[in-house]
Image (cartoon, rainbow, N blue to C red):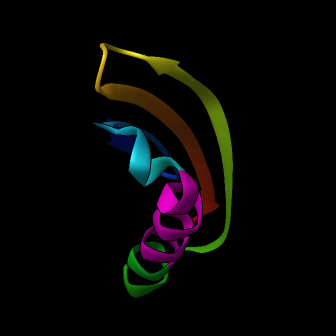
Amino acid sequence: MSEKGHAILKFTLPEIFNDWLEPACFGYSKKAVEMSGGRNLTMEMKGSDKASDDLWETVYELHWDE
C-alpha cells in the first residue's frame, strides 16, 4: 500500500532473508523515493511474525517528504 508520503510494505519470505531484509528494503525504498522527488525517508518495522513453518511475514511502514 502506498500513497503520498507514506507506504506499508509487507514481505512473506523464508527466515533466511530476515537478516538482510531491513537494510535492503530501506536502501531500495530510499532510492525509489529520491528518484520520484521525495526526501527524508524514515522506516519503522511494524512487526515480524512466523506465518507458517517455513515463512515469516514482516511489515515496514515508510514516511517521506514530497
Horizontal side of residue 14 vs 42, given as left or right:
left
Horizontal side of residue 43 vs 35, given as left or right:
right
Membership of 24 in magenta stretch: yes
Going 49% across and 32% down the picture, which residue do you hit? 59
Which percent across, then down, holds residue 28?
42, 74
Q: Quadrant of residue 39?
A: bottom right
Q: Is residue 12 above or below residue 32?
A: above
Going 62% across and 51% down the picture, which residue do you hit? 63
Which percent across, then down, holds residue 32?
38, 76
Q: Quadrant of residue 8?
A: top left
* Number of dots carrying numbers: 0
The answer to which of 66 and 42 lies nearer the viewer is 42
Going 35% across and 15% down the picture, which residue do you hit? 51
Q: Is residue 41 above or below residue 6?
A: below
Membership of 47 in magenta stretch: no
Horizontal side of residue 17 vs 66, given as left or right:
left
Horizontal side of residue 15 vs 18, given as left or right:
left
Q: Where's the C terminus, which quadrant?
A: bottom right
**First to last magenta residue range:** 19-30
Which percent across, then down, holds residue 64?
62, 60
Q: Examine the residues drawn in magenta and state their main secondary structure.
A: helix
Q: Where's the N terminus, which quadrant?
A: top left
Going 53% across and 52% down the picture, which residue do you hit? 5
The answer to which of 21 and 55 lies nearer the viewer is 55
